[in-house]
Every structure is written in structure tokens, then in C-alpha cells.
Image (cartoon, grey):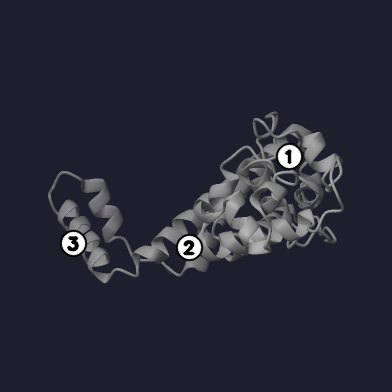
């Protein structure tokens, strides 16, 4: 979602996109729905990455001509808005607040991480100035309800959610890249040799001390949880 106070993606009219009709305005009865077209784009991104998503390729997936899809999504930016909100519909939006907002905010972050790992293209898509659609707004509503006990004002609550989402997206992007790097044992070995050389060259004593410290669990889940705890436990609500 966009940062608090920012407008949406340049060139995308949020009123037309989210409040207008999902059907083409002219011509004969449509053979496709915006939902089906968006689902096809999501499936393509899941399988081949965000770069593979073009109006022409999505049209081929649904068996349509590219021109017929432009009335639903006139450009890729609009299609990305639809895709982000479409997959946001997978996130649970109902929750009974317990009053322990830190624990609940951590639970939301874990939901976001699992969600982004299911759709590895999402972190990159979220770096744009996305306009929150109905599904995204429903999840935002849950997060704002969780933050009610903090006493933060509305703008601060939006900032906290934006900060949390940015953290999760950045971490997942790093996690995905790290998993890809592990597929190359030679590269991993080279990185280990490099860090060993740097730590013993005498010019980086702080790094040498840090690398010599006892190790911690390095599973993706454990690493994410440690980072997340530092972020949430350190939030100042004064």
C-alpha cells in the first residue's frame, strides 16, 4: 500500500479502478471478466515472474486478443493494481483482538510473509505506489483494529502498518534471493572464503568480533522472527 499521505500510482485513477464498473463500457457483451483476467495474470506471475506479465501474454492465457483486454486493464500498472488486490483477498481479515497488540502485529507480519512467499513477485510489486483496493483495505482494517490499544493517532497507525509491510517485503525479497544463491554451492563457498579473508585482515576488528560470536538459528523462519521481534518490541507508542 502507499505510504501515508501519498497518492496512488501515477496514471491510475483510483475512482475509476475501484469504484467504477469492472465491465467494459462499450461494445457487445464481454466474453471475459476482470476477475478471470486478473487471476490469469497472477498465475503467470507466480509461474514465470513479474517480468513475464504483459497484456499480450495474459490475453493469450485467457484465449483473447490483446485489444479486448485493454478495456479491463489499459496498461501494466493497472493490471498490477488488480493483481496485488486480487491476492490480498487470500489474507484473513477477521480477528478477535486480544489487546496484546504486539503479539497480534507479529501474527499479521507472519501472515504477510507466508503470503509473499506464495507469490514471490509481490515484494517487487509492492515497491510501486499501489492504490489499496477492497481486499487490501479489508486487511488494513484488521491491522488498524489491532493497533487501537496503542493510542497512536490515525496517521501513526498507517505509518506503522506501512513500516511493517515494507519490512516484510524487504525481508522476503532477501530470503528469496538467498534461497536462489544456495542453489550455487560454488558461490556460497566463495562468499565464505571472502568473509574469512576480510575478518582476518586486521582492518575490520568489529566485523571479526561479530563473525566470531556464537551462531544463532539460521532457518528462514527463525531469522525472520528475530528481526520481527526487534522491530515490533522496539516500537515507541509515546
Residue 93 picture quarter? bottom right
- Which of the marked residues, 2 or 3, is nearer the chain's N terminus? 3
Disc 2 and disc 3: Cα gap in Å? 23 Å
Which residue in the protein does label 1 denote? Answer: 157
Q: Nearer the viewer, residue 65 or 32?
A: 65
The answer to whether 76 appears left or right of 132 in the picture is: left
Q: Looking at the image, which residue is at 51% across and 62% down?
A: 48
Q: Nearer the viewer, mark 2 or mark 3?
A: 3
Identify the disc placed on residue 8. none
Q: Is residue 153 above or below residue 64?
A: above
Residue at disc 3, secondary structure? helix
Which residue in the protein does label 3 denote? Answer: 193
From where the camera sits, is residue 211 visible?
yes
Asked whether disc 1 touches disc 2, contact meaning CB atoms under 8 Å apart, the reply is no
Badge 3: residue crowd in 10 Å (few <14, some 14–19, many ≥20): few
Q: Looking at the image, which residue is at 68% across and 62% down?
A: 62
The answer to whether 76 appears left or right of 28 in the picture is: left
User: What is the x, y in percent for residue 26?
Assistant: 85, 42
Q: Residue furthest front?
A: 28
Badge 2: residue crowd in 10 Å (few <14, some 14–19, many ≥20): some
Disc 3 and disc 1: Cα gap in Å? 44 Å
Residue at disc 2, secondary structure? helix
Q: Quadrant of the N terminus?
A: top right
Identify the disc placed on residue 223. 2
Q: Quadrant of the C terminus?
A: top right
User: What is the x, y in percent for residue 145?
Assistant: 82, 49
Asked whether disc 2 touches disc 3, contact meaning CB atoms under 8 Å apart, the reply is no
User: What is the x, y in percent for residue 86?
Assistant: 73, 56
From where the camera sits, is residue 110 visible?
no
Residue at disc 1, secondary structure? helix
Q: Is residue 141 above or below residue 61?
A: above
User: What is the x, y in percent for residue 19?
Assistant: 86, 40
Amino acid at each position: 500500500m502507499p505510504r501515508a499521505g501519498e497518492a496512488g500510482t501515477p496514471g491510475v485513477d483510483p475512482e475509476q479502478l475501484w469504484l467504477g464498473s469492472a465491465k467494459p463500457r462499450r461494445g457487445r457483451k464481454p466474453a471475459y471478466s476482470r476477475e478471470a483476467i486478473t487471476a490469469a495474470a497472477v498465475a503467470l506471475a507466480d509461474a514465470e515472474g513479474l517480468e513475464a506479465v504483459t497484456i499480450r501474454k495474459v490475453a493469450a492465457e485467457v484465449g483473447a486478443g490483446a485489444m479486448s483486454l485493454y478495456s479491463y486493464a489499459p496498461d501494466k500498472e493497472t493490471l498490477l493494481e488488480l493483481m496485488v488486490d486480487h491476492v490480498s483477498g487470500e489474507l484473513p481479515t477477521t480477528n478477535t483482538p486480544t489487546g496484546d497488540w504486539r503479539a497480534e502485529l507479529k501474527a499479521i507480519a507472519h501472515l504477510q510473509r507466508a503470503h509473499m512467499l506464495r507469490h514471490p513477485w509481490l515484494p517487487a510489486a509492492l515497491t510501486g505506489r499501489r492504490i489499496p483496493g477492497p481486499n487490501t483495505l479489508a486487511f488494513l482494517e484488521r491491522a488498524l483494529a489491532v493497533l487501537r490499544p496503542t493510542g497512536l493517532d490515525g496517521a501513526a497507525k498507517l505509518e506503522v502498518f506501512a513500516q511493517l509491510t515494507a519490512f516484510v517485503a524487504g525481508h522476503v525479497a532477501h530470503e528469496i534471493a538467498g534461497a536462489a544463491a544456495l542453489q550455487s554451492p560454488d558461490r556460497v563457498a566463495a562468499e565464505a572464503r571472502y568473509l574469512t579473508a576480510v575478518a582476518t585482515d586486521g582492518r575490520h576488528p568489529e566485523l571479526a568480533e561479530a563473525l566470531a560470536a556464537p551462531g544463532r538459528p539460521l532457518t528462514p523462519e527463525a531469522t525472520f522472527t528475530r528481526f520481527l521481534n526487534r522491530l515490533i518490541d522496539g516500537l515507541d507508542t509515546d
